[in-house]
Amino acid sequence: MRPYILSETNFSHVKSCKYDVAILPMGATEPHNLHLPYGTDTFQAEAMASRVCEAAWNKGAKVVMLPPIPYGTETNQSKCRLSMNVNPSTLGLLIKDLVDSLEGHGVLKLIILNSHGGNEFKPLLRELSGKTTVQLFLCDWFRGITADVQKEIFDDAGDHAGEMETALGLAYFNEFVLKDDQGGIVADEGAVKATRFDAINNGWVSITRPWHLLTTNTGSGNPFPATAEKGERLMAVIVERLSQFVLELASSEMDSQFPF
């Protein structure tokens, strides 16, 4: 039993443990090129959150990982077979209910650890601000917390099922990565198509990208340079940085000036 994993622990432990911080891993169910499993985002979020909780717990933080949410917003991939969509408003209601539960149990600090680019939670944090005593924090691990090291570790991290996500797959759920008889991954090169508009291609104007038109087999980014060692290096950065934040957050007083 790991006491920082809610789904593994029991009431005998939980009823006497004063948790200070909860982490909610957010994933998705969608294809990732030909080689990575539909649960890639969820597997990533769970692997990261469990290791972050372990590192912080071992240093004294009372932190608990909630069970991962395996669904996300998939409107971009609606034409990709068995992408399972949950609309942003629905996800918001689900998270609000979980926040209400945490508030009722006196756990007043929540980190949303998001592993899916289609999940946009910043508007939700703004909407819930002032409406709950729970303080919410958002970590999109593929953005700020690893942005400075991605270029050091990867040839090209990629957008979806590219080198970075494939490296994490090889390191943490290798048994689900599709390979040929020689052990090489079975995938295409993750090339994406340009639109007919320069303003969109240059990033001056944004759209909701129809993934079935953008990609060949849902991959965006070349997965072939990926190695398990690269995935482990990235994980080490995430665990070090986020567990330190959890440790500081757990010991921080919830006064009128929090978090300043």
Image: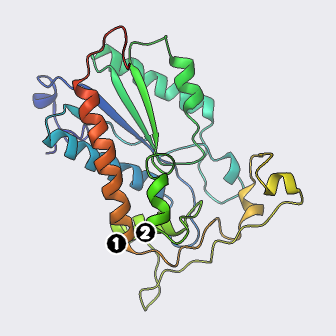
Give the tally of numbered discs: 2
Residue pushed farthest right? 196
State the residue in front, 245 or 211. 245
Q: Residue at x 60, y 60 (%)?
A: 159
Q: Can residue 39 be seen in this view?
A: no
Q: Quadrant of the N terminus?
A: top left
Q: What residue type is labelled 1?
A: Glu
Q: Which residue is drawn at 79% across and 55% down?
A: 202
Q: Can residue 84 be seen in this view?
A: yes
Secondary element at image label 2 = helix
The residue beneath circle 1 is 229
Q: Which residue is drawn at 40% across and 55% down?
A: 43
Q: Which element carries disc 1, helix, strand or loop?
A: helix
Measuring from the top left, give residue 173's x and y in whole percent: 36, 65
Scheme of colours in the image: rainbow
Crowd tier of the residue under label 1, counting other residues whose Cα lies within 10 Å: few below 14, some 14–19, many 20 or above: some
Q: How crowded is mark 2: few (under 14 residues within 10 Å), some or many (20 or more)?
A: many
Q: Which amino acid does label 2 sit on?
A: Ala
57 or 84, which lies in front? 57
181 up-or-down from 124: above or below: below
- Check residue 167 in the rendering and tell me which mark sits there, or answer none: 2
Whether residue 204 sits left or right of residue 74 in the image: it is: right
Q: In this view, does 103 lie above or below 124?
A: above
Q: Residue 251, position in %: x, y? A: 21, 25
Q: Do the residues labelled 2 and 1 touch (CB within 8 Å)?
A: yes
